[in-house]
Image (cartoon, helix red, strand yellow):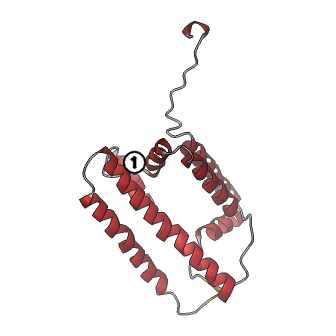
């Protein structure tokens, strides 16, 4: 939800206060072309993990009565995303590039607090304390989806492949193809 709301808002608004994740990534690729390789690598790793590739954590138990802290973390993460994003929106001088600065901050913090930190916390708890998070992390959710509904999991993986192509060749599919003929040289 934390990704869907700003992403849909940016897509519907068109030239709104921040770009889409694709637009932000495309801007980074314009500034530094190796960004495309990093994005492709991250998506390939995510797809492989989603399909269960890699070491599996040991069996862990869910601690009874520990259900309050994910809500506290979620609330704190929202504050840690919203406050810096609002400060950037207020203090970065307006202009075309300010949209991308806000996109970098907002999407970077969403990735950090919404994906990276929960994954690390889950990994540490599972590997060192044999405690499972009271909610499944992203890759475990996708792995369970693959076991229950293989067709839906296949659609998710196909979506990741389309996303990979879209971001690596941004702004694909909105690329004009020029096929020069013999007389155009």
User: Can the viewer see residue 181?
Assistant: yes
Quadrant containing the N terminus in the rendered view: bottom left
In terms of depth relative to the viewer, which is nearer, 115 or 52? Answer: 115
Q: Residue at x 38, y 72 (%)?
A: 80
User: Can the viewer see residue 5?
Assistant: no
- Relative to 148, is 69 above or below? below
Looking at this view, name the residue that lies furthest to the top: 183
Q: Which residue is mark 1?
A: 11
In terms of depth relative to the viewer, which is nearer, 76 or 158? Answer: 76
In terms of depth relative to the viewer, which is nearer, 108 or 34? Answer: 34
109 horizontally vs 152: left or right = left
The image quadrant of residue 125 is: bottom right
In terms of depth relative to the viewer, which is nearer, 96 or 177? Answer: 96
178 horizontally vs 96: left or right = right
Q: Residue at x 48, y 81 (%)?
A: 70
Q: Residue at x 34, y 47 (%)?
A: 97
Looking at this view, name the residue that lies furthest to the bottom: 65
- x, y percentage for residue 184? 55, 10
- Relative to 134, is 1 above or below? above
- x, y percentage for residue 20? 42, 50
72 horizontally vs 123: left or right = left
The image quadrant of residue 134 is: bottom right
- x, y percentage for residue 130? 68, 87
Quadrant containing the C terminus in the rendered view: top right
How many marks are shown on the rendered structure?
Answer: 1
159 horizontally vs 48: left or right = left
Q: Residue at x 35, y 44 (%)?
A: 14
Element assignment for label 1: helix
Q: Residues within 10 Å of mark 1 (few under 14, many from 20)?
A: some
- x, y percentage for residue 175? 51, 31
- Relative to 149, is 120 above or below? below
């Amino acid at each position: 939800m934390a990704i869907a709301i700003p992403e849909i808002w940016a897509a519907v608004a068109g030239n709104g206060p921040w770009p889409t994740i694709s637009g932000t990534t495309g801007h980074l690729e314009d500034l530094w072309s190796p960004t495309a390789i990093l994005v492709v690598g991250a998506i390939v790793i995510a797809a492989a993990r989603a399909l269960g590739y890699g070491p599996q954590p040991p069996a862990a138990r869910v601690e009874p009565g520990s259900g309050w802290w994910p809500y506290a973390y979620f609330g704190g993460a929202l504050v840690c995303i919203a406050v810096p994003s609002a400060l950037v929106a207020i203090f970065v001088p307006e202009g075309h590039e300010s949209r991308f600065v806000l996109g970098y901050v907002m999407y970077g913090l969403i990735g950090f607090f919404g994906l990276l930190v929960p994954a690390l916390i889950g990994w540490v708890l599972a590997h060192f304390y044999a405690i499972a998070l009271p909610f499944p992390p992203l890759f475990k959710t996708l792995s369970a989806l693959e076991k229950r509904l293989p067709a839906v999991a296949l659609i998710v993986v196909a979506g990741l492949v389309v996303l990979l192509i879209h971001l690596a060749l941004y702004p694909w599919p909105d690329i004009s193809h020029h096929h020069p003929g013999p007389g155009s040289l």
